[in-house]
Structures are given as structure tokens and as C-alpha cells.
Amino acid sequence: MVETLKKGVRVTGPQRDKLAADLRRKYDGGKSIRTIAQETGRSYGFVHRLLSESGVRLRSRGGATRAKKVRA
């Protein structure tokens, strides 16, 4: 389980590898980067960077998209 980390604390070495593996497991399980960031107390950018460094293929953005207007 990913523990909540103090904001601004550097994560290096084996601790960073373990954290990256935990974050990857959560992301592969379907959680969003934003949700993982809230759970761990880290920023969106930190989680995104750690996932990218660990080789995760990031999903595309979700949510509503704008439909094209049909002209009469």
C-alpha cells in the first residue's frame, strides 16, 4: 500500500523504486494520476513523472469531448 508522503521530501534509491512500483500497480488497476496524487499527498506532476520514469504507458485523457456542431 502506498503511504502518504510529506510534500517536498525527496524520494531516492530503493525507496523511489518501491514507490514507483506501488504507483504503477494502482495506475494499472485503473486509478487516475490525480487520484493517486491525492492518496499519496504528492503532486500530479510528481506522480506523472514517476510513472513515466518507470516505463508505464500512460492512458489518454478521458472525460467529455466536444461534439462537432452540425450546420443546417
Image (spheres, rainbow, N blue to C red):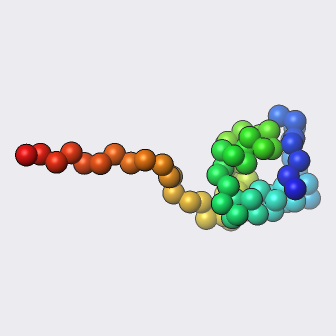
Q: Position of residue 43 (x, y in %)?
A: 72, 39
Residue sitting at the far right: 14
Q: Is residue 44 in sight in this rendering?
A: yes
Residue sitting at the far front: 72
Identified at 59% across, 60% down, the residue is 58
Q: Is residue 16 left or right of residue 36?
A: right
Identified at 70% across, 63% down, the residue is 29
Q: Quadrant of the N terminus?
A: bottom right
Q: How many marks?
A: 0
Res 59 quadrant in image: bottom right
Identified at 74% across, 40% down, the residue is 38
Q: Position of residue 66 (x, y in %)?
A: 34, 45
Frontmost residue, 29 versus 45: 29
Q: Is residue 13 in sight in this rendering?
A: no
Residue sitting at the far top: 7
Frontmost residue, 33 versus 53: 33
